[in-house]
Amino acid sequence: MKGEGKEEPCFADRERHVQTLVDAAIAAANPQRLVAAQIAPTGDSVRVADQRFSPERIFIVSVGKAAIAMALAAADQLGDRLTAGIVISKPDTSPALPAALQYFQGSHPVPSSLSIDATLAVRHLLTETQADDLVICLISGGASALLTSPVLSLAQWRTLNRALLFSGCTINEVNTLRQQFDSVKGGGMAEWASPAPCVTLILSDVIGNRIEHIGSGPTVPTQRDAQQARAILNQYDMWSRLDQDTIEAVKRNLRDSAEKPPLPIEPVNVIIGDITVAVAAAAKCAEEMGFESTIVSTTLTGEASEIGRMAASQAQTCAPNRCLIWGGESTVTVSGTGLGGRNQEMALSAALALDRVPNVLVAAFSTDAEDGPTPVAGAWVDGETVQLGAEKGMIAAKYLENNDSYHFFATIGRGHISAERGTNVNDILLILTYE
């Protein structure tokens, strides 16, 4: 540890290795590059993905954590062919956008009146569209909260969303419920764009790339399933997390749920990037640093603390100079009152199992650089992490129990991972072993 001479350079090397892998993974999922490759004007026509159109006017709607970068890339490719567009994302200051694009700030992870107002602006814009126009939608993670037109009151909708986020539901289950109670989700935006053709380029943050669940599928016609929604609410005992007013509104909506009519033109939805590009880049980077790398899975799911223990166990049986990589997304069933995120919780859980184990580290981070409601992407740990906390009077197990991983790492002054924002393709878990 600090003051023992040889430990500080070892810490610096490990921190450098982790940051290099993080940067490589996130750079590979650069949304501007991915979007630019999909849009190509030629003569009087424009190619979007593998579709070719000759529109009178072109509209853009870009929503999500990567919305600004995606919109800039599309606008750059289209030039003066772009008629108008709306960009909805999280930053509270307006980015430098072309004159044709209007920026709206939304709220995330719980929607607010900002998200509703931004969505209403999208609806008004799309009422202008005609059959000979083209609507290009750009969707990335975070769109579910940023783009919303709920059938519940705002207070009820916020209550339900908070309960979902703390329940331990998977993202697919969360978005199934969101579609049930929100008219823009499950194809609502494609309905607004009709009769114009609608092509959506998607940066996926959903394991398995089910397009109806990425951003809750605003351009993916999806029939509501009240029975399935009810089953999820029961499975996670959601009723105990809701006030009576919200319960009555939810039950009323489930009773009155109706089928949606088919659209005259089937929208086109294309995934342009996902977790596989990020983990492949990390694996290549690890090889270049001298590690033998293995991509174990790109569909990792489960409770964060349990995954952390699994990673620690794998690390202790792994040969030296290896890098094991997983992509996916864990969940946290919150019972404490602390501050953290699923990746920091995963890392802290791994730290407890790695206490005093030499020559291994575990790192977990979000490619959107925001781990839960914290300003960091995640954390990395090794055999010294728990002891560093103990030296400051901190019991790591207590912090984990209280879901307070952020304050644990902030207090020991070591382990937090920072990264560039602007993309979102799930999370990455990795192990590095040393001789």
Image (cartoon, rainbow, N blue to C red):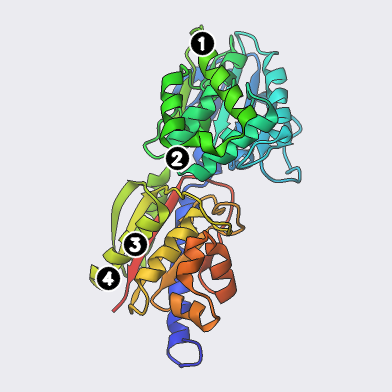
Q: Is residue 283 above or below residue 8?
A: above
Q: Within 10 Å of the Cα at label 1, are there few (<14), some (14-19), or many (20+) other Cα atoms?
A: few
Q: Earlier in the sequence, mark 3 or mark 1?
A: 1
Residues 326 and 80: in front is 326
In the picture, residue 76 is in which quadrant? Answer: top right
What is the number of the mark on residue 317? none
The residue identified by callout 2 is: 169
In the picture, residue 60 is in which quadrant? Answer: top right
Q: Where in the figure is residue 352, as x and y percent of width and height? A: 39, 70
The residue identified by callout 3 is: 309
Residues 238 and 111: in front is 238
Q: Secondary structure at mark 3?
A: helix
Q: Amino acid at mark 2?
A: Cys
Q: Is residue 321 above or below residue 178?
A: below
Q: Where in the figure is residue 151, as x and y percent of width and height? A: 63, 21
Looking at the image, can residue 147 be seen?
no
Q: Amino acid at mark 4?
A: Gln
In the picture, residue 242 is in which quadrant? Answer: top right
Q: Where in the figure is residue 42, as x and y percent of width and height? A: 54, 24
The residue identified by callout 4 is: 316
Q: Is residue 322 left or right of residue 100?
A: left
Q: Amino acid at mark 1?
A: Ala
Q: Residue at x 50, y 77 (%)?
A: 389
Q: Secondary structure at mark 2?
A: loop
Q: Within 10 Å of the Cα at label 4, are there few (<14), some (14-19), or many (20+) other Cα atoms?
A: some
Of labels 4 and 2, the one closer to you: 2
Q: Earlier in the sequence, mark 1 or mark 2?
A: 2
What is the number of the mark on residue 258? 1
